[in-house]
Every structure is written in C-alpha cells, then in structure tokens.
C-alpha cells in the first residue's frame, strides 16, 4: 500500500502507536524493529487491543486485511509523517544544537503560546522515530510547531530535516556532546550545520546567537540571518544576579523574576524571546512567559530539602553542559557548596581526558565539597584524595549535610536524581 492510501487510514484513525502497552482503540500500529525486538511479532496483539490496522514489513505475519504490508515500517512511518507535514499550514521551527535544546523548545513554546495555537515536541521525542511521531501528533488548527531535532552522528540531522522540513531554525550551540558518534568538536559542528544547509537550500531563515563564534562562522553565507544576543537589539536579555534564580532585564528596562537557575539559561531565554518577537509576540508577553515557566524533568530544577537547596540538573550531561553548570554554580552565593557529579556517557576515546578535566574544573572553581560517581570518574580517584569517589552511584555514602547549596548533575543513565532521596 502506498503512503497516500495509508494516509487516508491515518486521517480516519485515532492516531499512531508503536507500543502495544499503550495502543488505543482506532490507532494505526507501526510494527517497528530494533536491535532486540521485532514489532511484527506484536502486530496481532495490537489489533486485539483495538488498533484499526497494523503496519508490518514481513509478509508471513499478514493474517487479514487489517495488516498493511510495506517494505520497511520505519521508512513508512517517516514518509507518512512527512506527507502529513506537507498538508499542514503552520510554521515549523526546528531546534538543534549540543546543549539546551529541550529548555529552548519549552521556553519558545511558552512564548509563542501567548499569541498562537502552538505545538512542541513532547519530552525528548527528537530522533528518527520521535520526530515522525511528533509530526503525526500535530493537528490542522496548529499555527506554530516547534520540533526538537536531536542527532549523535553526521548525517542524522539532515535526515530529520527531510522529514520535518523546518521553515525556521536555530542551533543552540556547538559543544562536546556525542563525541563517540561525531568524533570531534569539528564533527559536532558539521553535524549541526545540516539544519543550516537545509534552510539555506530551501529558502528558510535562521536565528543565530551573535555571541557564538562557531554559529556566526557556520551561517556566514546567509544574506539575512536573524541575530540575537548582539547587545544592540532592544530585546537582549541579561542578568547580574548572584542568587539561585535568574532575574532578567531587557535593554528597554523591562525585568522579570524567573524560576530558572544558571547563567547558561540566558542564551536559551534570548533564543526564545527573539523567535517570539520576530513572529509578532509582544516583548512584555515574551517576558511574562519566561517568568511563568517552571523547569521540570530534572532540568535546572531547584528543590528545598531540609535546610539545603538543591539544583537538580541531571537529565543529561556532556563536558560542555557540565562545565557551564559548574561555572554558574561557583558564582552563586553560599558559604557551603557541594557538587555530586555522575559520569558523562557517549564520549568514546575522549572519556578519560574529559572526566579528568571536569575534576580539575571543580578544583579550580574552589567548590567546597565534591562527590564523583561512576567508573569514568573513579579512574582518577588516586590523583584527588581530597574528593570522594564512588565506582557506582549506588555505593554513595554521605555524612550529614545541612545549610548548603548542592548541585547534582550527570548523564541520564547515572540516575543522579536518586541522590535527592539520600539527602
């Protein structure tokens, strides 16, 4: 069956599912495959659970007209999503980059929602499966669609752009993320430049942080790039606060208290405000949206635990994001500071050096107490006897901590948020 025919079934359906545990009556079930599973095996169960049709790619599983046979289920899902995207009239904004994609997406959603019916990627559905599922969740009433685009190797972002076809785009920054896949910082830049190439080739527009040399060089061929953070624009947002929460102010004197912590979030704020004002949202409404935003999902969350204040920033980590968190944390006012850092994953051959660099950064920033969890950090234990090292996060042993400011950060697989329970 061709994509147009499948699309007719999609329009008549109640949505798309790839998991029999959450399939709903009237869904189209896509029997995806992975390294350790074959969705074709679950197609019958999906139909029994109420799915209208099951899209499969192995003929032996086709038992009735309720099974739609395609050459490749994943490619069919991606083509269906792109076909749906072409039917929609909303403006598509693609967000890529090493750090801050999700926070920038959420802030941009908050800002644009002040004027438009806006849709944004849910959670972290930003890869070759998540992006299609995101697109297929957008309805005809949507005016603005914000699509987070995540990649871990060269070529991946280009494929996502072909599916999502963004009209506007931004790369938050170029950092030391997914080095195992990209191979170097230059590889990270090459991979993220793929959204710029797509927009340049297709007449799209780019938002560029004027203070980021990487991004300015990468977008030099755009005749009309939309700059922000250029210290001249009326909507440049800054903060001089040494307190946990950022207080932001604009060039024309507007200011707001926020629920965000860390100066690294200023770039995310400026990106969202620039996108908003460019698309016609009044600056005051933009700032209102930023002030109302509440961080969640272990991203720069501030938690009060007894007499301690905890900055929980452990949704994920790489050398660039961890260093920025440490630098921002070091600037905050407190007589007693603790950091709990977990291993950073997907660094490949860079892992040993980058974990060593992070321990040295803690030392240079004169943070009072440090606890390092994970095998990568543990390798350097003998070099830093004044700090606490644990090969596994589960082995962490703590003495009583009171009246202190605490930062917890690490890669998702380290589940560093569980330290809050101990504290």
Image: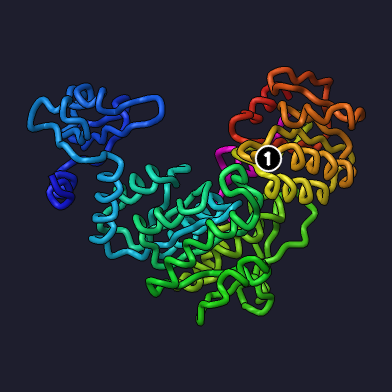
Query: Residue at 69% of width from left, 55% of height from top?
Result: 264
Q: Position of residue 353 (x, y in %)?
A: 77, 41
Badge 1 local density, few (<14 within 10 Å), some, or many (20+)? few
Q: Which range is magenta? A: 291-305
Q: Position of residue 64 (x, y in %)?
A: 8, 28
- Foreground residue, 269 or 114? 269
Query: Residue at 40% of width from left, 72% of height from top?
Result: 201
- The residue that mark 1 highlights is 349
> Any magenta on residue 292?
yes
Camera sees residue 27: no
Q: Classify 251 as above or below 35.
A: below
- Foreground residue, 79 or 388? 79
Q: Is residue 15 left or right of residue 297?
A: left
Camera sees residue 409: yes
The residue lying furthest to the bottom in this view is 223
Q: Is residue 316 left or right of residue 196?
A: right
Q: Classify 162 as above or below 69.
A: below
> Any magenta on residue 333?
no
Residue 185 falls in image quadrant: bottom right
Query: Residue at 72% of width from left, 26% of height from top?
Result: 375
Marks counted in the figure total: 1
Residue 268 falls in image quadrant: bottom right
Query: Residue at 53% of width from left, 69% of height from top?
Result: 207
Q: Position of residue 115 (x, y in %)?
A: 41, 65
Q: Position of residue 328 (x, y in %)?
A: 76, 51
């Amino acid at each position: 069956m061709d994509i147009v025919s499948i699309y007719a079934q999609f329009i008549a359906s109640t949505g798309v599912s790839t998991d029999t545990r959450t399939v709903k009556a009237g869904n189209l079930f896509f029997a995806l495959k992975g390294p350790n599973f074959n969705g074709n095996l679950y197609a019958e169960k999906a139909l029994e659970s109420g799915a209208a049709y099951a899209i499969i790619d192995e003929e032996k599983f086709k038992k009735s007209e309720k099974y739609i046979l395609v050459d490749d289920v994943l490619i069919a899902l991606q083509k269906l999503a792109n076909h749906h995207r072409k039917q929609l009239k909303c403006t598509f904004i693609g967000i890529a980059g090493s750090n801050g994609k999700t926070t920038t997406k959420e802030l941009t959603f908050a800002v644009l929602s002040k004027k438009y019916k806006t849709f944004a990627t849910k959670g972290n559905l930003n890869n070759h499966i998540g992006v299609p599922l995101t697109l297929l969740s957008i309805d005809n009433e949507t005016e603005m669609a914000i699509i987070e685009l995540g990649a871990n190797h060269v070529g991946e972002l280009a494929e996502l752009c072909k599916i999502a076809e963004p009209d506007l785009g931004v790369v938050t920054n170029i950092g030391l993320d997914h080095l195992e896949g990209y191979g170097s910082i230059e590889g990270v830049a090459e991979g993220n430049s793929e959204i710029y190439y797509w927009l340049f080739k297709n007449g799209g527009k780019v938002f560029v942080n004027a203070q980021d040399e990487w991004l300015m060089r990468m977008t030099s061929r755009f005749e009309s790039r939309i700059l922000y953070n250029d210290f001249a624009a009326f909507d440049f947002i800054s903060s001089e606060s040494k307190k946990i929460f950022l207080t932001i102010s604009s060039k024309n004197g507007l200011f707001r208290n926020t629920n965000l912590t860390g100066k690294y979030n200023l770039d995310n704020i400026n990106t969202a405000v620039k996108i908003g004002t460019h698309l016609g949202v009044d600056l005051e409404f933009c700032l209102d949206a930023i002030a109302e935003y509440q961080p969640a999902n272990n991203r720069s969350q501030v938690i009060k635990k007894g007499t301690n204040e905890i900055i929980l920033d452990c949704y994920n980590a790489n050398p660039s994001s961890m260093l920025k968190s440490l630098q921002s944390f070091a600037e905050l006012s407190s007589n007693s500071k603790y950091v709990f850092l977990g291993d950073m994953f997907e660094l490949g051959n860079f892992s040993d050096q980058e974990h060593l660099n992070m321990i040295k950064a803690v030392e240079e920033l004169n943070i009072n107490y440090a606890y390092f969890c994970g095998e990568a950090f543990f390798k350097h234990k003998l070099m830093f006897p004044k700090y606490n090292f644990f090969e596994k996060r589960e082995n962490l042993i703590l003495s009583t901590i009171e009246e202190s400011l605490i930062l917890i950060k690490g890669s998702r697989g380290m589940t560093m948020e569980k330290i809050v329970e101990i504290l």
